[in-house]
Image: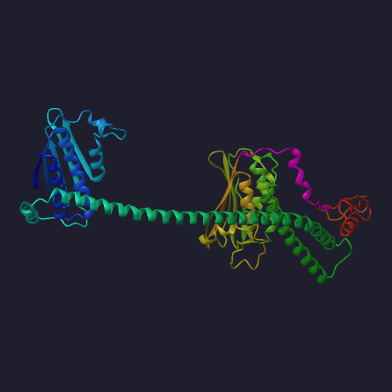
Amino acid sequence: MSYPILTTEVRFEQDIVQVRQRARQIAKGLGFDSQVQTRIATAVSEIARNAFKYAGGGKVEFIVEGESPQIFRTRISDTGPGIADLATVLGPNFRSQTGAGLGLAAAKRLMDEVQIDSGPDRGTAVQLVKQFSKQMPALSAIELNQLVDKLARQIPEDPYAEIQQQNQELLRTLDELRQRQEELVQLNQQLEDTNRGVLALYAELNDKAESLRRASELKTSFLSNMSHEFRTPLTAIMSLSEILLNRLDGELSAEQDKQVNYIYKSAESLAELVNDSLDLAKVEAGKLTVRLADFEVEDLFSALRGMMRPLLPQNSAVALIFAAPLELPTLTTDEGKVSQILRNLISNALKFTEAGEVRVAAEIGDEGTVTFSVADTGVGISPADQTRIFEEFVQLENSLQKRVKGTGLGLSLCKKLAEFLGGSIEIKSSPGVGSTFFVKLPILYPGDIEDPLEMSADKGDEIPLAIANSRSPAPDSAAKVLSGEDEDSFSVFAERLAGRNSLYCDRSDQRR
């Protein structure tokens, strides 16, 4: 629906001022605010000035269209020569030496939409569109007719009054610009203060990060050094305990046998903690090395089966099953570290499974990977704890935790070793149902191969035990043991083991 409001002619220069006045009056009558009134009046007067300047005059029509939402359309037309090369004039890079096109550019900035039709045979018609805001109520035909009647009775103001009005608008605009400038200055000051605060915060964070880095290095160094120092007396305690338990120095009473067993088991638990701590320290310090070797999963499972069977007591309600690997290629990676990961997972599964089975399997994965899985029918792990269990020293509360002992480092070490080998570890678990750990590893280790000397450098971390499976040498043997430790306990251990026929080298001047 279209409602013509007013039509006026532009024949003389003063008509441009009257068109501006009428545009302001109509915009006010339609309910536009003062800023929008000024925008409409300015855009209409600029286009009317173009029509007078380039075509000698024109016609201005004010129209309201639509019902909801409504739009205010102003059409300024002339019968002049038209605009040559309209596309260039409307382009963003157009620059005029005579001022041509400036009115159109200003109107496009002030109005919601500007439509232009121009040609040499039909002149130029410019339509300026301003949309009613959502807060403005739609005007009925009666209200629009009342506005038309009001405009017909309204006597045009003196042109000088319009100039005065423009001056007032200019002053208001300048005042608004000044206020905005002050706000920008304040905002810039706030931004500068914020930037200074951010820089200070960054500096503080850098200091904290450096402190944390140093603390981490100190912790790693402490763990590494103390692990070495703890290993020597722990190995001696375990070795001497084994000598007593194997009756190499004579029989023990029942109470003595029980107490020595306590000593051995406590030292064994502490040795496990020391070994895990040392491995974690190596990972964090970036000193962990890889020993590449080609091996078959079937051979790995066979070795694990022999190592893990003793963990199951006689007549156990838990079955340890190693599924036969099918069509798996030869792996080229660090077999020892893969074995260490699986041993930790199997050991945990056996600890927290009272009945059922622990199943170890392997299958070919995608993109040159193999996935090992250790599934149990144990207590399971809640979803909230399935991330925490890979943190250091985290042990979950459950009914079996009091009966089993651990360091809380095993799963954290498994995760870091898997990542070191270029893989990952995941878990699927349900409380009361069981857990399955998945270890995904590349078939071919993706990292660089270290220098052989560097690769074997950490062999010295291990303290060999000279305890044979038979526990005691044959009576007629002349076994000789070469000990590289300066502890008296190792001298006693070597002498007892070899029947005092040992060669002992004191290295008190070469402590590690």
Which residue does the image show at 14% across and 55% down from the upper left?
Answer: 29
Q: Is residue 167 left or right of residue 261?
A: left
Residue 497 in sight in this render: yes
Magenta-tinted stretch = 443-468
Q: Nearer the viewer, residue 12 or 305?
A: 12
Which residue does the image show at 9% across and 43% down from the upper left?
Answer: 8
Which residue does the image show at 60% across and 61% down from the upper left?
Answer: 353
Q: Is residue 453 left or right of residue 137?
A: right
Q: Residue 424, position in %: x, y?
A: 58, 48
Q: Nearer the viewer, residue 341 or 96?
A: 96
Queried whether the magenta region covers residue 465, the answer comes back as: yes
Q: Residue 253, position in %: x, y?
A: 84, 70
Which quadrant would residue 397 be assigned to in this image? bottom right
Q: Residue 394, position in %: x, y?
A: 61, 62
Residue 284 drawn above or below residue 86: below
Which quadrant would residue 330 be assigned to in this image? top right
Q: Is residue 258 left or right of residue 359?
A: right
Residue 97 drawn above or below residue 259: above
Queried whether the magenta region covers residue 204, the answer comes back as: no
- Name the outermost residue toward the front: 160
Magenta portion: prevailing SS class: loop
Q: Residue 5, position in %: x, y?
A: 9, 49
Query: Is the image coloured rainbow, by chain, by secondary structure, or in one colour?
Result: rainbow
